[in-house]
Image (tube, rainbow, N blue to C red):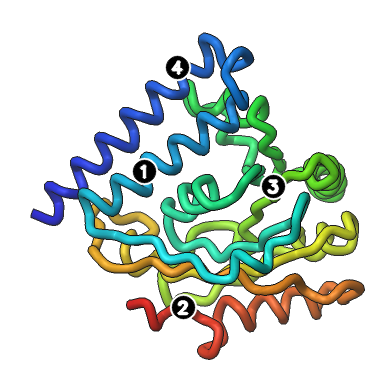
Amino acid sequence: MRLLRSSAFNILMFGSGSLLSLWCVLGGRYLPGGILAVAQLWGRICIWGLRVFCGITLQAEGLEALPVGGAIIAAQHQSAMDILVWLALLPRPAFVFKKELRRIPLFGPMLEPAGMIPVDRGGGGTALREMVTGVRQAVAAGRQVIIFPEGTRMAYGARGKLRQGIAALARGTGAPVLPAATNSGQRWGRKAFGKHPGPVLVKLHPPLPQGLTREEVLTQLEDVYYGPENTPAAAA
């Protein structure tokens, strides 16, 4: 039954995503709110589908810490659900994404028109400077920029080595950086097809203090992601 429910959700997720992407390709520039609004609609459809088909409910804490206007959210990443969560929760999300995703049919070409920020992971210092510039522009436009400092989805309970790009963003943009923890990997594993019913808690923390060193930024994020007093495992 669980696999059947997961299959029904996947049909909804990929089917609605394909249809909405095609809609954007054909007339995205003319849509109210543009392509971003369509992406947010898709996120809300999928969050609804997770609840209806898989029994996964979303519980968000700390959203009152989000400042008005632009900000950077340094989010823990355990599941594909994390993308859907931030699309559904934020007023104007903008994801930092690896440029290879632009090759995905229909979906990929819509990323940059929606205001998402590509990064070349093998591009060294040049790519890092371009990312900082892109994030600075997005924040100035009032967007909430989501970056996953772990760099990839991590299994629930696993500890990853954080990438230093988030520290460069904190120092290079001057924007508030809000850590966010989750237990999404308990419900939807990083490479799993089946999904487990229960609550997913997303906990947004207050902004990091300004002026931190690179090491201090990474240490404070690690405390949020992996510290037992901060993890949202209580939602299990």
* Residue 234 higher or lower than 68, as above or below: below
**Residue at disc 3, secondary structure:** loop
- Residue that label 4 marks: 22
**Residue at disc 1, secondary structure:** helix
Query: Tag on residue 232?
Result: 2
Type of the residue with mark 1: Cys
Query: Which residue shows up at 71% across the image and 80% down it?
Result: 220
The quadrant where residue 169 appears: bottom right
Type of the residue with mark 4: Leu
Give 117 or 115, whichever is nearer the viewer.
115
- Residue that label 1 marks: 46
Mark 1 and mark 2: Cα distance apart in space: 22 Å
Q: Is residue 126 toward the left or the right of residue 160 in the image? A: right
Query: Tag on residue 121?
Result: 3
* Residue 106 higher or lower than 44, as above or below: above
- Assess whether mark 4 and mark 1 are in contact (beta carbons under 8 angstroms): no
Closer to the observer: label 3 or label 4? 4
- Assess whether mark 4 and mark 3 are in contact (beta carbons under 8 angstroms): no
Mark 1 and mark 4: Cα distance apart in space: 17 Å
* Residue 220 higher or lower than 116, as above or below: below
Circle nearer the N terminus (1, 3): 1
